[in-house]
Image (cartoon, grey):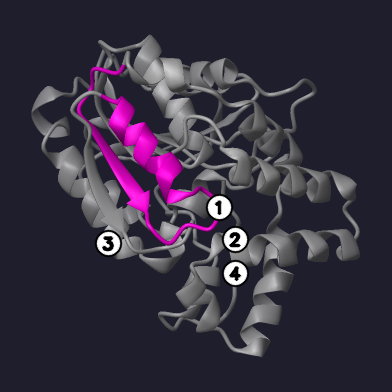
């Protein structure tokens, strides 16, 4: 899951509601229904973004550092970024297949995977179905299946995202999401004016496919896939997360054999609240596996 809420301010407290920019080196091409964005050079790193987000929104702030050593390949889900909205319900298999197709299009026999929120379930499905191709796996704010609290929040999210696209509808959705997306400390640090700006910017940036993404969140269950993962795995737990409970994240790590865990004191938006620390955790772990073990050509 994710939300974006850009604002003109750039203080540590308010960068949690700032929009990222797409790296200049990125280019967007089509696979089947999705827009594929490869950028950088080196071993391939596949990126899977969150519900209601996009490649740029969720990974934009950390891409410059990650692509210094890796060739990042990412796919926007239907209804966000440059991908058209789907005409049928989304499936994890469909998103996973599209991500693997993007790797194939780049000529990568093997690759590392980094998933965020809903993207962790996509990445888990890929890793379970293609164990010989995945060299390393990073899961940030993961869930295998929504628990009761998360399901209740997601159902409200889905209802509001489906209600309409008027300014009033979008504002109601933004006011619901903001306190769930930010950590309590980040939210408390915003002035009243900054909160209102964040609400406006969040409302303006909601992708048209958000309801479709959240519908998939509610149907997600990759618990059976976790035991099939053989790739070295790092679980980055967002310890102040108000959307994906910490216990749900811990369960993912416990079910993957040999998984490492790193805690990050942030809400559900590590790319906004703590991008440097998030990038360092991902880059440090991936650096142990990509350089020597990833084949970047077919």
Q: Earlier in the sequence, mark 3 or mark 4?
A: 4
Asked whether 131 or 268 is in front, the reply is 268
Distance between the Cα atoms at labels 4 and 2? 16 Å
Q: Residues within 10 Å of mark 4 (few under 14, many from 20)?
A: many
Residue that mark 2 sits on: 180
Please state the horizontal and vertical placement of residue 182, each as a whole percent of the image.
53, 66
Q: Earlier in the sequence, mark 3 or mark 2?
A: 2
Compared with 271, 120 (above or below) is above
Residue that mark 1 sits on: 243
Please state the horizontal and vertical placement of residue 260, each as a whole percent of the image.
20, 38
Q: Earlier in the sequence, mark 2 or mark 1?
A: 2
Q: Which residues are magenta?
A: 229-256
Q: Earlier in the sequence, mark 4 or mark 2?
A: 4
Q: Quadrant of residue 218?
A: top right
Please state the horizontal and vertical placement of residue 112, each as a whole percent of the image.
28, 29
The answer to whether the residues at label 2 and label 1 have Cβ atoms under 8 Å apart is yes
Residue that mark 4 sits on: 6
Distance between the Cα atoms at labels 1 and 4? 19 Å
Asked whether 176 or 90 is in front, the reply is 176
Q: Residue at x 47, y 24 (%)?
A: 99
Residue that mark 3 sits on: 277
Q: Secondary structure at mark 2?
A: helix
Q: Secondary structure at mark 3?
A: helix
Q: Quadrant of residue 54?
A: top right
Asked whether 237 or 102 is in front, the reply is 237
Q: In the drawing, does residue 60 fall left or right of residue 32?
A: left
Distance between the Cα atoms at labels 2 and 1? 5 Å
Please state the horizontal and vertical placement of residue 233, each as a whole percent of the image.
24, 32
Q: In the drawing, does residue 239 fall left or right of residue 7?
A: left
Task: Please identify, in this view, whether the residue under mark 1 or under mark 3 is nearer the observer.
Answer: 1
């Amino acid at each position: 899951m994710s939300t974006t809420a850009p604002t003109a301010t750039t203080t540590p407290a308010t960068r949690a509601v700032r929009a990222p920019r797409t790296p200049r080196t990125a280019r967007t091409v089509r696979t089947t229904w999705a827009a594929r964005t490869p950028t950088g050079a080196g071993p391939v790193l596949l990126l899977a973004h969150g519900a209601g987000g996009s490649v740029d929104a969720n990974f934009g702030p950390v891409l410059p550092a990650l692509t210094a050593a890796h060739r990042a390949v990412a796919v926007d889900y239907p209804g966000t970024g440059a991908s058209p909205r789907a005409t049928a319900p989304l499936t994890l298999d469909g998103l996973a297949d599209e991500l693997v197709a993007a790797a194939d299009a780049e000529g990568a026999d093997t690759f590392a995977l980094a998933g965020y929120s809903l993207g962790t379930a996509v990445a888990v499905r890929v890793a379970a179905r293609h164990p010989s191709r995945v060299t390393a796996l990073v899961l940030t704010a993961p869930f295998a299946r929504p628990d009761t609290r998360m399901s209740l929040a997601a159902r409200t999210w889905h209802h509001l995202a489906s209600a309409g696209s008027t300014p009033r509808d979008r504002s109601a959705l933004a006011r619901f999401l903001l306190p769930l997306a930010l950590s309590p400390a980040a939210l408390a640090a915003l002035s009243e004016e900054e909160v209102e700006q964040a609400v406006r910017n969040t409302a303006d940036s909601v992708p048209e496919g958000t309801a479709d993404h959240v519908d998939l969140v509610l149907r997600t269950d990759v618990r059976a896939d976790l035991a099939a993962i053989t790739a070295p795995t790092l679980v980055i737990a967002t310890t102040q997360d108000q959307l994906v409970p910490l216990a749900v994240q811990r369960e993912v790590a416990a079910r993957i054999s040999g998984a490492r865990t790193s805690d990050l004191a942030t809400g559900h938006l590590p790319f906004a609240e703590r991008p440097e620390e998030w990038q360092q955790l991902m880059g440090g772990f991936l650096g142990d596996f990509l350089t020597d073990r990833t084949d970047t050509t077919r």
